[in-house]
């Protein structure tokens, strides 16, 4: 962290050092005549659990690394609130996520283009996925091997994983060894954002190589409070640290990369958003933009949990001190073993039925089992399959709780408010059960623990999904890109009606992509960095 004064002057100020912010800071600071200041509300990524792959089980609850958001209660999910982990550390959520490298389907990005976002079709974005990627399996038409973000194969291959893949194939799901290649459909192993069995977050990939550059300034524990304007031009940011307010003046641009929750909140606090809502909190309107905080989307699904016949699960390791020590030594000495695994080890992208032209469901198979995050792992040998619709139709909202940046926003995801989403989550559980009935995985199963054999009808399955379903923290869309009245940014990610201000993070996605959001967010930042620099691939 640089020595702090009351005023910092810079060419670009970036708010948020997450997947997008670290990427932007790394790329923009490549130009030695450009000064960049990166603000992060959290601290340095020194916690060792960040860097051990299985450490997400610790960081997902750690308030020193995690904003630990809670949504409002939802009528369609049995009047429950939902826990949303978001990173509060260098690397942001890429420092605490489940490490899965998934881009989504080509059709996701072609839809963005069809919605009027020129330059965002799959053919437009694929070069930026390749630019970011350092693929263990080498370069190809779909992959790059010279980028900062290391993408690796899973080291630890549990027999349960192989059995689940065999059972998926037996159930009619094609095997797929590359979800990010020619087609996403099928079942196979996930790839991870790891390098030498250590997490390769956006901070590790992009910020660490850049942090010694004299033109890059990184300010940690710096909570952005509001944006500064001269007329309709953004000219800076005020941040707070330890009770002291510091101003960063940007000669060229202010860039919000604080994520799908904090970026719209900061716009609203600064007077950009629905005028009526701003007036409710006594905030002067700089620009009436009704779409700020609207269009909130997330992946929500249900878990099929099994009791295992053999002690092959992470549950068994974590309930045995001897096996914990063995796993720790195996990792320290050889970078192998159960501490190297991601949040899900096997995945599948499947069609819910003949009406689906592309996969509309994602499976995340886990060699462990649990209920709520804070309840810990089950005490029995258990494994599970999480099932969710990949392109949910349900839309939520984010609004201000108060005019203070210290108060979390009001988040209403409206999960399962769409009939299509309700149908898909039920179809997904039924397909998952069909896989569970096949010989290879059935040989490992004592019984289905949840929802359990008594739950059979569609109505019963839907009730289970409402009462026990979970988010996998893929919030997007709250500052959507487009050219309609509800769009917040244009295809250059410039805030509509405001000069010198862009939003560059997952909040600009007009629709949620088919899978995990870390890789697409890094792609967005890679592409935006070239936009800002006036370059193209």
Image (tube, rainbow, N blue to C red):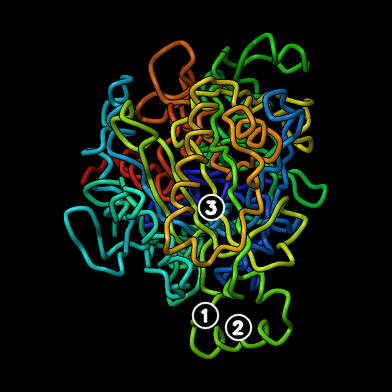
As measured in the structure, the alpha-carbon distance from the residue carrying label 3 to the one carrying label 1 is 21 Å
Q: Position of residue 126 (x, y in %)?
A: 25, 45
* Rendering quarter of residue 130: bottom left
Name the residue carrying label 1: 337
Name the residue carrying label 3: 385
As measured in the structure, the alpha-carbon distance from the residue carrying label 1 to the one carrying label 2 is 6 Å
Q: Residue drawn 58% across and 68% down?
A: 54
Q: Is residue 4 in view from this perspective?
A: no
Question: Mark 1 touching mark 2, by CB under 8 A?
Answer: yes
Is 414 drawn above or below residue 430 in the view shown? above
Horizontal side of 138 relative to 493 (left or right) equals: left
* Rendering quarter of residue 163: bottom left
Name the residue carrying label 2: 327
Q: Residue drawn 16% across and 54% down?
A: 141
| Mark 2, secondary structure of its residue | helix
Horizontal side of 315 relative to 294 (left or right) equals: right
Q: Residue drawn 56% across and 86% down?
A: 332
Q: Is residue 418 in view from this perspective?
A: yes
Foreground residue among 135 and 25: 135
Question: Mark 3 touching mark 2, by CB under 8 A?
Answer: no
């Amino acid at each position: 962290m640089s020595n702090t004064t009351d005023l910092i002057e810079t060419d670009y100020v970036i708010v948020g050092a997450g997947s997008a912010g670290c990427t932007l800071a790394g790329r923009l600071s490549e130009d030695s005549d450009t000064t960049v200041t990166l603000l992060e509300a959290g601290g340095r990524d020194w916690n060792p659990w960040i860097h051990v792959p299985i450490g997400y089980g610790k960081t997902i609850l750690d308030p020193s690394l995690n904003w630990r958001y809670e949504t409002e209660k939802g009528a369609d999910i049995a009047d429950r609130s939902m826990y949303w982990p978001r990173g509060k550390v260098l690397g942001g959520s890429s420092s605490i996520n489940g490490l899965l490298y998934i881009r989504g389907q080509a059709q996701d990005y072609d839809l963005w283009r069809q919605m009027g976002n020129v330059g965002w079709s799959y053919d437009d974005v694929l070069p930026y996925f390749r630019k970011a990627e350092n693929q263990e399996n080498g370069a190809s038409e779909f992959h790059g091997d010279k980028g900062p973000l290391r993408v690796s194969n899973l080291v630890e291959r549990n027999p349960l994983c192989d059995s689940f893949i065999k059972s998926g194939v037996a159930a009619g799901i094609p095997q797929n060894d590359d979800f990010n290649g020619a087609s996403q459909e099928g079942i196979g192993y996930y790839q991870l954002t790891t390098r030498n069995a250590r997490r390769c977050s956006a901070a590790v990939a992009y910020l660490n190589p850049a942090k010694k550059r004299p033109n890059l300034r990184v300010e940690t524990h710096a909570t952005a409070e509001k944006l500064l304007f001269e007329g309709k031009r953004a000219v800076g940011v005020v941040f707070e640290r330890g009770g002291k307010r510091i101003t960063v003046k940007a000669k060229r641009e202010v860039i919000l990369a604080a994520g799908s929750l904090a970026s719209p909140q900061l716009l609203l606090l600064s007077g950009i958003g629905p005028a009526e809502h701003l007036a409710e909190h006594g905030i002067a309107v700089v620009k009436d933009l009704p779409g700020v905080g609207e269009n909130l989307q997330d992946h929500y699904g249900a878990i099929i949990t099994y009791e295992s016949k053999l002690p092959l699960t992470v549950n068994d390791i974590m309930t045995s001190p001897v096996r914990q020590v063995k796993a720790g030594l195996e990792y320290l000495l050889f970078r192998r073993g159960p501490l190297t695994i991601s949040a899900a080890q096997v995945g599948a992208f499947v069609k819910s039925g003949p009406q689906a032209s592309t996969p509309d469901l994602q499976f995340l198979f886990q060699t462990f089992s649990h209920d709520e995050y804070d309840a810990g792992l089950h005490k029995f040998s258990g494994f599970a399959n999480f099932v969710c619709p990949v392109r949910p139709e349900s839309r939520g909202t984010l609004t201000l709780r108060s005019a203070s940046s210290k108060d979390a926003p009001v988040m209403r995801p409206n999960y399962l408010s769409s009939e299509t989403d309700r149908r898909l989550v039920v179809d997904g559980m039924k397909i998952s059960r069909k896989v569970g009935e096949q010989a290879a995985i059935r040989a490992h199963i004592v019984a289905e623990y949840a929802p359990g054999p008594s739950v059979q009808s569609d109505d019963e399955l839907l009730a289970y999904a409402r009462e026990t379903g979970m988010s996998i923290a893929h919030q997007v869309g709250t500052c959507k890109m487009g050219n309609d009245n509800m769009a917040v940014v244009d295809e250059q990610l410039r805030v509509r009606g405001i000069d010198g201000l862009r939003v560059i993070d997952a909040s600009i996605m007009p629709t949620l992509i088919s899978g995990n959001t870390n890789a697409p967010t890094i792609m967005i930042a890679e592409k935006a960095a070239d936009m800002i620099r006036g370059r193209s691939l």
